[in-house]
């Protein structure tokens, strides 16, 4: 092996090298989540905005863009998990004997459940891809935009997809655990990248909490409002007109 | 004070070990924790038993020799002190106290509560030094050091190498120790020239010793008797990333 290869191997073998990989792939995944949430919120703009956005994503760079994006995202996701598994295996080996009396002095709850929140998110991502990306349900897969039947009706699909309370419940649990994962993960990645100091410590802590809360509110607003009937699919095409907000108008 | 002790007893390194129960009766509350163990040991010896073995030396919180995980927390739940500085007045009459060794694969148990912490010595030998001949003590201000750097280096140098950080970490990570030892030299002009070599060497030795990986729970910071901040871990991460990058291309 040449010198560069040896250096890279040393980097992978080192604890800090692996943690840097988890941190950098974490940044990619958090970036994706923020973009995904922003895209999802277009549902409040109505059918046309949502379906335009979906059409753009699928036809960006003549359809190549979304695949490049998916490959990078999938690569980051797999690397994040594989590296974490390698780290966890080492950690379990490093502390094979447990204390008879276990206690912690400052570990946060979210840091203690990282593995469970991470595994739940993994299960949810697989479900979510089958649900809304691959669309194994023929009823969801066959939905057409009333304004342009040549394209898929993502807007109608999301509303139809969240009619099942079990799906909504799983979504709420998974997104809540995802945000717990991020509350610890975002602050941790700053630490791993060496950006935490006396000056930045508090800001980093709050950044992790703030991003987690923003994502939690953004992602959960959609299934919650659909469940309570605040967003309905009236089957009409066109911008804004397709969204019916059935919340009572304010009484003046 | 009358107390009940639940103590880890292990005859030798290869023994499986177990928790044994001992009464600790008529303990003066002004006794230190180690003095309480001395009293219990005297009674065990009088009864013809094998006394509880534990590490200790200066008994004033500066040597880093005493250890013990007390009720699940290294050096007890009292902050900023070592086990030898814990006093029995911090407990209540009738308490049951769990006393266990510092647990980590890299700190093998020698006997009872005594662990072999020489892995730390090998990490320091892998880079925790300045290799130039220093000669006689230089004039105080011959090498100017900014106050902020001197303070940061001094804070890191407060590490007494007791190993509580490893014992508190669920992954038995030594990052706080290595971060402190690397930072206290890396922050100073005398240590700066060998920074990359030091960080790469110490981190590789840390990994080779079988310590786990930091998951940023900062339990280490919470139990450190010298209250060293986990910021030294961030600095170690940054210095390691830079050193590994330079090693790859130079």
Image (tube, coloured by chain):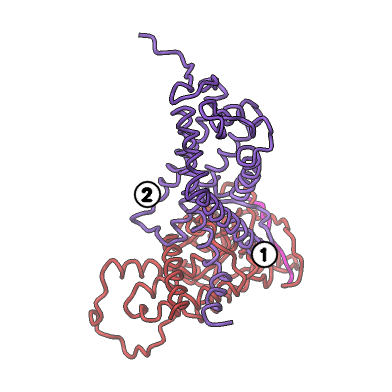
Which numbered disc, 1 or 2, marks the residue that appears first in the sequence?
1
Instruction: Pinpoint residue B111: horizontal percent, then vertical percent.
Output: 69, 71
Identity of the residue drawn at 50% across and 45% down: A59
Residue B7 lies in the magenta stretch: yes
When the figure is inspected, residue A219 is found, relative to residue B29, above or below; the finding is: above
Q: Name the magenta segment's main secondary structure.
A: strand
Res A211 quadrant in image: top left
Mark 1 is surrounded, within 10 Å at the Cα level, by few (under 14), some (14 to 19) or many (20 or more) other residues, namely some
When the figure is inspected, residue A87 is found, relative to residue A212, above or below; the finding is: below
- The quadrant in which the C terminus of chain A is found is top left
Q: Which chain is red?
A: B
Q: Which residue is mark 1?
A: A93
Res A71 quadrant in image: bottom right
When the figure is inspected, residue A201 is found, relative to residue B110, above or below; the finding is: above
Nearest the eye: B15 or B127: B127
Identity of the residue drawn at 49% across and 58% down: A24
Rendered shade, chain A = purple
Identity of the residue drawn at 74% across and 60% down: B18
- The quadrant in which the N terminus of chain A is found is bottom right
Q: Can residue A106 be seen in this snapshot? A: no
Circle 1 chain: A
Q: Which residue is mark 2?
A: A203
Instruction: Pinpoint residue A115: horizontal percent, then vertical percent.
Output: 62, 50
Q: Can residue A168 be seen in this snapshot? A: yes
**SS class, disc 2:** helix
Res A228 quadrant in image: top right
Mark 2 is surrounded, within 10 Å at the Cα level, by few (under 14), some (14 to 19) or many (20 or more) other residues, namely few
Instruction: Pinpoint residue B115: horizontal percent, then vertical percent.
Output: 63, 70
Q: Which residues fall within the magenta stretch? A: B2-12
Residue A151 lies in the magenta stretch: no
Nearest the eye: B85 or A191: A191
């Amino acid at each position: 092996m040449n010198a560069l290869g040896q250096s890279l191997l040393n980097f992978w073998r080192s604890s800090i090298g692996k943690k840097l990989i988890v941190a950098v792939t974490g940044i990619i995944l958090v970036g994706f989540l923020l973009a995904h949430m922003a895209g999802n919120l277009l549902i409040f703009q109505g059918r046309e905005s949502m379906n335009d956005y979906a059409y753009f994503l699928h036809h960006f760079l003549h359809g190549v863009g979304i695949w490049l994006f998916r490959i990078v995202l999938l690569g980051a996701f797999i690397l994040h998990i594989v590296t974490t598994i390698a780290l966890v295996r080492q950690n379990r080996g490093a502390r094979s004997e447990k204390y008879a009396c276990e206690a912690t002095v400052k570990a946060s709850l979210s840091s203690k459940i990282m593995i469970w929140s991470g595994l739940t998110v993994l299960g949810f991502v697989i479900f979510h891809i089958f649900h809304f990306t691959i669309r194994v349900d023929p009823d969801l897969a066959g939905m057409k935009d009333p304004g342009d039947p040549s394209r898929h009706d993502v807007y109608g699909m999301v509303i139809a997809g969240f009619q099942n309370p079990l799906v909504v419940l799983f979504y709420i649990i998974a997104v809540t655990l995802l945000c717990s994962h991020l509350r610890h993960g975002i602050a941790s990645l700053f630490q791993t990248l060496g950006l935490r100091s006396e000056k930045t410590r508090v800001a980093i802590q709050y950044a992790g909490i703030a991003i987690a809360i923003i994502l939690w509110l953004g992602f959960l607003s959609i299934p919650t409002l659909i469940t309570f009937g605040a967003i309905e699919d009236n089957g009409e095409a066109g911008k804004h007109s397709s969204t019916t907000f059935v919340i009572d108008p304010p009484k003046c | 004070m009358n107390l009940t002790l639940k103590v880890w007893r292990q005859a030798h390194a290869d023994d499986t070990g177990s928790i044994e129960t001992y009464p600790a009766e008529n303990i003066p509350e002004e006794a230190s924790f180690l003095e309480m163990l001395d009293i219990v040991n005297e009674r065990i010896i009088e009864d013809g038993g094998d006394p509880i073995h534990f590490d200790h030396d200066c008994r004033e919180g500066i040597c880093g020799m005493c250890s013990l995980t007390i009720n699940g927390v290294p050096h007890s739940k009292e902050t900023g002190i070592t086990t030898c500085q814990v006093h029995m007045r911090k407990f209540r009459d009738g308490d049951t106290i769990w006393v266990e060794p510092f647990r980590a694969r890299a700190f093998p148990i020698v006997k009872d509560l005594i662990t072999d912490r020489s892995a730390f010595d090998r990490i320091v030998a892998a880079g925790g030094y300045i290799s130039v001949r220093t000669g006689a003590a230089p004039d105080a201000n011959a090498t100017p050091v900014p106050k902020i750097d001197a303070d940061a280096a001094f804070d890191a140098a407060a590490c007494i190498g007791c190993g509580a950080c490893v014992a508190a970490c669920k992954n038995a990570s030594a990052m706080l120790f290595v971060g402190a030892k690397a930072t206290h030299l890396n922050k100073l002009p005398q240590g700066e020239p060998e920074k990359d070599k030091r960080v790469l060497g110490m981190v590789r030795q840390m990994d080779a010793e079988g310590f786990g990986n930091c998951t940023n729970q900062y339990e280490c910071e919470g139990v450190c008797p010298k209250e060293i901040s986990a910021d030294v871990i961030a600095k170690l991460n940054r210095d390691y990333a830079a050193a590994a990058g330079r090693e790859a291309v130079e």
